[in-house]
């Protein structure tokens, strides 16, 4: 078995803390070196009985990387010395750095988890590639601007580095099962995809639409909110030539895939539901059929986004389910929907020319 030397950049909630404490709501500035950190259960172990009915998975990238036999967690970087100390105490790893750049240039890890806030994600991802990374997992949002997202996708593509951008529900193995059903003609020809919004932070729909849509129409976007986010809040659609139309409709489930011979629906709380055409005495009917395992489950955290890039390295998967390429498509669609809504619902053609366009997110992202 090939093993990979792995490092984490950003020891915040996703990087380290979620497995060691309950999140605290205290306000901070993204550039603060000294972040609010509660007291931590540094020697916590994971027991199946702690999560009856659930999988009992850890959440953080540090824990996911330390648990896999194929990965050896060797180093971490964070500006905050208290978080570096907590990492050393939990994992017994002395190689900790206040500078992510110094860590990447010195340690040259094979796998890098970029769990910082959004602003530095593109630069750190590209630097990790430059320093020889063979696979990269990042947190979400992937990036602020289209140019940043493109830079990440291109750097990884050119170096043959699998890039997975956010441990969202799309990374769960039940989504791979859904894709298998679609590919095996389980719902017939795909006619439409539906989601409650384009949400380039959590875009289940993009996994099922590989083509960049040709144009979008959007309406009813709200102005920037108090939290700092101006992500699209309206409704609309994205049109793809020779592909399904994607609808963004308030009240829609996490994702719905409607085909000529059936339908699949994913809801975060209840998981996947499958309806398929079956033959009956006098024709055919679409009926509920049991979802083939695995069904969606929580918690899933960093475990499956890591699994996807390891599968890519092992030659078992072409592209992570929540790949940077797919997230970049979702970001471009979301930005285009905003432009359309601002112009009173006018059609906006893709690809967009102004790559400095992008989104602002909640203050803590
Ligand atoms: N996938 C999910 O469900 C999920 C859940 C929560 C947060 N997130 C995302 O995770 C990211 C991190 O946020 P968080 O909630 O884990 O906690 P956080 O904001 O406390 O963590 C960020 C950490 O990165 C460090 N950092 C930032 N820039 C750095 C740099 N240039 N060099 C070194 N260290 C740097 C900070 O000191 C901090 O410890 C955010 O973008 C957030 O949107 C995703």
Image (cartoon, helix red, strand yellow):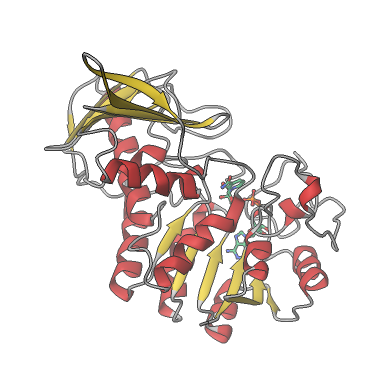
Please tell me which residue is depicted at 74% across the width and 54% down the height of the picture: 19
Front residue (pair 6, 154): 6
Please tell me which residue is depicted at 67% across the width and 52% down the height of the picture: 57
Relative to residue 150, is residue 52 depicted above or below?
A: above
Q: Position of residue 311 (x, y in %)?
A: 44, 66
**Quarter-of-image position of residue 163:** bottom left
**Quarter-of-image position of residue 337:** top left
Residue sticking out furthest to the front: 281
Tell me: 42 left or right of 330: right
Q: Position of residue 303 (x, y in %)?
A: 58, 57
Tell me: 148 left or right of 165: left
Tell me: 8 left or right of 351: right
Q: Is residue 142 visible?
A: yes
Q: Is residue 358 visible?
A: no
Count of numbered circles on the image: 0
Relative to residue 233, is residue 294 depicted above or below?
A: below
Q: Position of residue 273 (x, y in %)?
A: 45, 29
Please tell me which residue is depicted at 63% across the width and 62% down the height of the picture: 64
Front residue (pair 315, 94): 315
Front residue (pair 69, 129): 69
Residue sticking out furthest to the left: 242
Q: Position of residue 114 (x, y in %)?
A: 54, 63
Relative to residue 353, is residue 234 depicted above or below?
A: above
Assign ligand 1 to one image quadrant. bottom right
Please tell me which residue is depicted at 59% across the width and 56% down the height of the picture: 302
């Amino acid at each position: 078995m090939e093993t990979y030397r792995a490092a984490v950049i950003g020891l915040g909630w996703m990087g380290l803390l979620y497995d060691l404490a309950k999140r605290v709501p205290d306000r901070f500035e993204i550039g603060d070196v000294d972040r609010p950190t509660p007291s931590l259960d540094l020697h916590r172990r994971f027991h199946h009985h702690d999560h009856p009915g659930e999988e009992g998975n850890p959440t953080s990238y540090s824990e996911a990387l330390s648990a896999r036999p194929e990965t050896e967690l060797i180093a971490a970087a964070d500006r905050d010395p208290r978080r570096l100390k907590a990492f050393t105490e939990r994992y017994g790893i002395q190689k900790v750095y206040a500078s992510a750049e110094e860590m990447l240039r010195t340690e040259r890890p094979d796998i890098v988890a970029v769990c910082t806030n959004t602003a530095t994600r593109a630069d750190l991802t590209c630097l990790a590639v430059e320093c020889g990374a063979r696979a990269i997992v990042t947190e979400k949002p992937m990036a602020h601007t289209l140019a940043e997202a493109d830079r990440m996708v291109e750097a990884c593509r050119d170096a043959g580095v699998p890039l997975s951008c956010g441990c969202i529900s799309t990374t769960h193995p039940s989504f791979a099962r859904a894709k298998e059903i679609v590919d095996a003609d389980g719902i017939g020809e795909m006619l439409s995809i539906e989601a409650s919004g384009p949400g380039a932070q959590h875009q289940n729909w993009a996994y099922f639409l590989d083509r960049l849509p040709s144009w979008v129409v959007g309406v009813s976007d709200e102005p920037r909110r108090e939290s700092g986010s101006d992500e699209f809040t309206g409704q609309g659609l994205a049109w793809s030539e020779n592909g399904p139309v994607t609808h963004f409709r308030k009240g829609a489930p996490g994702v719905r895939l409607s085909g000529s011979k059936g339908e699949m629906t994913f809801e975060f709380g209840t998981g996947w539901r499958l309806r398929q055409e079956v033959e009956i005495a006098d024709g055919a009917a679409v009926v509920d059929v049991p979802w083939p395992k695995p069904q969606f489950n929580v918690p899933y955290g960093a475990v499956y986004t890591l699994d996807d890039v390891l599968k890519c390295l092992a030659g078992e998967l072409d592209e992570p389910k929540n790949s940077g390429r797919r997230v970049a498509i979702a970001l471009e669609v979301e930005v285009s929907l905003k432009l359309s809504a601002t112009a009173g619902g006018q059609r906006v053609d893709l690809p967009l020319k102004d790559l400095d366009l992008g989104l602002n997110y909640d203050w803590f992202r």
